Image (cartoon, rainbow, N blue to C red):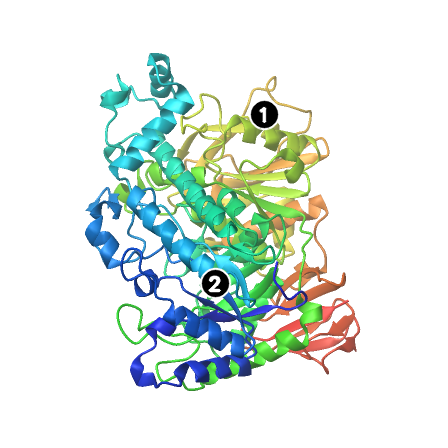
Amino acid sequence: MTQHSGRLIFGAAYYDEYTPAAAGPDRLERDMQMMVDAGFTTIRIAEFTWGTWNPAPGVFDFTHIDRALDAAAAHGLDVIIGTPTAAIPTWLASRHPEVLGVTAAGPNKYGPRQNMNILAPAYRLYAEAAIRALARHTAPRAHVVGFQLDNETKYYDAANADIQRAFVDHLKARFGDGQEGLNALNSAFGLNYWSNRVGAWEDFPDVTGTINGSLAAAFDAFRRRLVTDFLAWQRAIVDEYRREDQFVTQNFDYEWRGYSFGIQPAVDHFQAADAVTLAGVDIYHPGEDHLTGKEIAFGGDISRSLKDGDPYLVIETQAQGQMGWLPYPGQLRLQAYSHLASGACGVMYWHWGSIHNSFETYWKGLLSQDYTPNPTYREACVVGRELKEHAASLTDLRKHNRIAIMISNEAYTALEWFSLAAGFPRQYAGGGANYNDVFRWVYDALFDLNLEADIVPADAPVERLGRYAVLIAPALYVTPQATTDALRAYVAGGGHLVTTFRTGVADENVQVFTDRQPHGLSALLGLGTDQFTRPDGVALRPVGALAAALDDDAAVDPGVAAELAASTFMELLTPIDAAAREGDAEVEVLATYDHHAWSGPAVATRAVGAGSITHLATMTAPALTRAVLRLVAERAGVTDWAQDLAGTVTVRRGTNGRGRQLSYFLNYSHDAVAIALPVSGDDVLGTAAAPGARLEAGTTVTLPAWGVLAVEA
């Protein structure tokens, strides 16, 4: 993966091109020395600087790149080279304006990054020349350890004429290019509605104006494939120049809500990751009093799962960042170990020094505008020193999770069209919850319970699903038959499946099934639905095993209405015909609707052989969600001492590179926390004793505010 086994990557993006002359002629040398003092191992350069070192067609000036490479080599720093294709030069836009993306809102203007059509021939022509020149120039350098393909690549909502022509060609290849193919297309997408039927391929309409959710979803899926192909195209070029020991990565990102929130709708990460040898990610998160670790965890869990559990690289995360992100004392260190606790092989900040002009002057790097050491930099020095000193204990963390969450780009797109709020596109429905809100609803509950999870795609084969005792499929609106079959086989094999509202609604063409929902699973559950509404003033009444579990949970007060309220969406579940029910077990209702009109099961479970299926028909409050998931986990046999610490400290675990168990105890709080240590082992970082000192189970250990304890058993 890198030239240095047993060493963690630690560093930042660095832009010699952005450094103002007023910073002084020795600024580069001083920066490099400060990086060495901070324990940096690596810098990342060259992305977003295409127009600087390729100022005209066929003209390449690598002055700044060579300056950074030479300085890094002189100071023993490794370098990751980023291909620059996410921001096009002015000359390319001027000579070939067709490379700019055209969206539903109209043609893009020059100026912002990522404003192009990644399929445009002129863009590909000059991008290839730039990539080749850069790779040829830098790959021979011994301290260049890897290449980053592009930056946070997506399709950028581009719907240019050539993209739409390619989409029509794709449909012809899928359905057939004759009249029979057109008939199949019209049937699959339901294009008879509102006279949208396509009678001839040459009459195919501009897709950006469609009201047909099936056609729009197919177009989005096609554009996600363009991203996959684009990264594979870049990888093939870089492969012609890179050495075998140089990795290839990409900094995948997530849905943005002022920080990383949920899965990225414009990229299929699992497919696109085939283009890289080392999964990479950009993770940004709330800070100060809003630091919880949840965004770090879910971003890491997805990234780790892209290469089936292999370590991944955090290519970008915040140092100081934007307003509200200035870390309290201890938080930068806690954040770094939070990434490692998820399985990261390194942490890199965006970026080294704050920008002095243009667009992102508000976004602080590790250093501020005056380049002097500050508290954040000094804390980074502590992190760098510890990572070097304790690398043998901290590297190559592998996890053996027994819980997985199934995610789906197709379900995300479908719920943008058939929203939870109103059933029609979210943009017209005034917003409301989307797919990621449902994903985070269940993910955050697991995080709060100290139940770690992997992430799997909706097309994961049953063999992969079979590794997990519990599988959660939130809002899996689109369920191709192959996915339904895999879920059924998972349960038949003894797995414990958890589904939620809006699962098993439509097929891969977003055409709604004609049977009871969840399609293909209602026979297992013994319940199904054909009616739903919004839960206006609807409460929930826990019963049976769930009520007993809540009675034992002091964090839940049945007298607080909000903790037992239904929200966002509710399905009305009724029994299916006994003849259609699979198996002999009775339905076990865990919660019912408490309302003057609506009644019946809101949360129910049913044993199916050695397995089970549990369905949440509405969005429950966090405490109730945690209680349901903990009950499922207990019955599946995947709970242990970590759940006893839930609400006090966060626990993240795995096996390190030397085969020893490593447990992280993370305190996301401004108060010190005392715990009775549940395991014996060595205090890696010296939180409770000297570094490496033995700690025995039962010992009371105090974690300081925003503190971390790492125990190696």
Left or right: residue 701 versus residue 98 is: right
| Residue pointed to by mark 2 | 138
Residue that appears at 39% across and 21% down: 188
325 or 122, which lies in front? Answer: 122
Residue kind at label 2, given as amino acid type: Thr
685 shown above or below 429: below
| Viewer can see residue 77 | yes
Horizontal and vertical percent for residue 87? 32, 57
| Residue pointed to by mark 1 | 523
Residue that appears at 61% across and 53% down: 550
How many numbered discs sit on the rendered protein? 2
Horizontal and vertical percent for residue 121? 31, 42
Horizontal and vertical percent for residue 281? 49, 57
| Quadrant of the rendering where the N terminus is positioned | bottom right
Who comes first in sequence, dot 2 or dot 1?
A: 2
Gap between marks 2 and 1, in whole Å?
Answer: 59 Å
For discs 2 and 1, the disc positioned in front in the rendered view: 2
385 shown above or below 198: below
Q: Residues within 10 Å of mark 1 (few under 14, many from 20)?
A: many
Residue kind at label 1, given as amino acid type: Ala
Q: What element does badge 1 sit on?
A: helix
Residue 449 quadrant: bottom right
Residue 155 quadrant: top left
Q: Residues within 10 Å of mark 2 (few under 14, many from 20)?
A: many
78 or 589, which lies in front? Answer: 78
Q: What element does badge 2 sit on?
A: helix
| Viewer can see residue 668 | no
Horizontal and vertical percent for residue 443? 53, 52
